[in-house]
Amino acid sequence: MKNKLKLAIPKGSLQDSTINLFVNAGFDVSSISRSYYLSFNDPEIEAVLIRAQEIPRYVELGVFDAGISGKDWILENRAKIKEICELCYAKHGLKPVKIVLATPEKSKINSVNDLKGKIIATELVNLTKDYLKKNRVQCNVEFSWGATEIKASCNLVDAIVEITETGTTLASHGLKIIDVIMESTPRFFANLKSWNDPWKKEKMRKIALLLEGALNASRKVGLKMNAREKDIPAILKKLPAIKKPTIAPLSTKGWYALETIIDRNQAKDIIPELKKLGASGIVEYNINKLVY
């Protein structure tokens, strides 16, 4: 029987960004409408969409060899797994989400110490209890099935612990953040038994390398340009690079081609400066993978 690696892919808020990450890593991923099964252009991978909240538990139990879920859900499940790599992305960007303690704007609760004897609603019950224990505060923690923000804004509970990227949704419900419990990023992780299987371990390492390479590349762009030899010293002072820019002579005497990789958000500022310094034929291009 051919070797297979069973992967759990998060369904919900991380679904599209995770699938896009695999696509950028070089995998063709498709699904049948309304199906929880994903098709990869790799016969050695079987992938299923599962709620991120449940993935750490199912990976720990060995239902899946590996999966992707947030660090917060790994802690919430108290899952014993092998973290392979951190993947810093979210639903709308390339930054961690925050697990926050929030209360109504008009509430007199302004810190965790004000919560003694109060009620908190959250999906992250274990994580919240650990946080309260660390701060030596005793209060009631209720599991929330969803729509957690409205429970605080309607005074059904005194506070909530919720996941947020920007805080906009919380603010729209009239809530204020009074503490950041932790920042969380997705992790690619393995079942302990699967990690000890040589074939599966190597397969997961290769996947991790490609995913990290795709994430690295999403933050960078490549730059190519031509420059006269006399202008190169000034251009190099302006031009960042992972190590050093590649410089190669052109067929025209005294002219050179330069190529480097820079942060994507630097390009709009650097390109006009390079033009002033004598660079010409400047080309900015996307890169698919960047493996350090």
Image (spheres, rainbow, N blue to C red):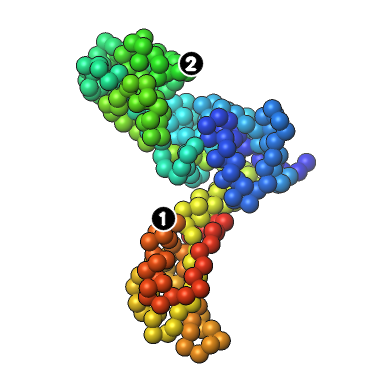
Q: Is residue 31 left or right of residue 81?
A: right
Name the residue located 40 percent from the left edge and 27 percent from the top edge: 169
Neighbours of disc 2 within 10 Å: few (<14), some (14-19), many (20+): few
- Quadrant where the N terminus sits is top right
Q: Is residue 194 above or below residue 203?
A: above
Q: Amino acid at mark 2?
A: Trp
Task: Kindly indicate whether the residue at mark 2 contacts the one at mark 1 (C-beta within 8 angstroms).
Answer: no
Q: Is residue 247 above or below residue 154?
A: below
* Towards the viewer: 25 or 154: 154
- Is residue 129 in sight in this rendering? no
Question: Residue 156: which quarter of the image?
Answer: top left
Name the residue located 50 percent from the left edge and 64 percent from the top edge: 284
Looking at marks 1 and 2 on the same chain, the residue that comes earlier in the sequence is marked by 2
How many numbered marks have been drawn onto this rendered protein structure? 2
Q: Is residue 63 above or below residue 151?
A: below
| Residue 244 location (% of width, % of height) | 42, 71
| Residue 218 location (% of width, % of height) | 50, 52
| Residue 199 location (% of width, % of height) | 65, 47
Name the residue located 42 percent from the left edge and 42 percent from the top edge: 95
Q: Amino acid at mark 1?
A: Asn
Name the residue located 41 percent from the left edge and 34 percent from the top edge: 165
* Towards the viewer: 206 or 103: 103
The residue identified by callout 1 is 265
Q: Is residue 137 left or right of residue 55?
A: left
| Residue 119 location (% of width, % of height) | 33, 12
Q: Residue furthest right?
A: 1
- Is residue 176 in sight in this rendering? yes
The residue identified by callout 2 is 145
Number of the front mark, 1 or 2: 1
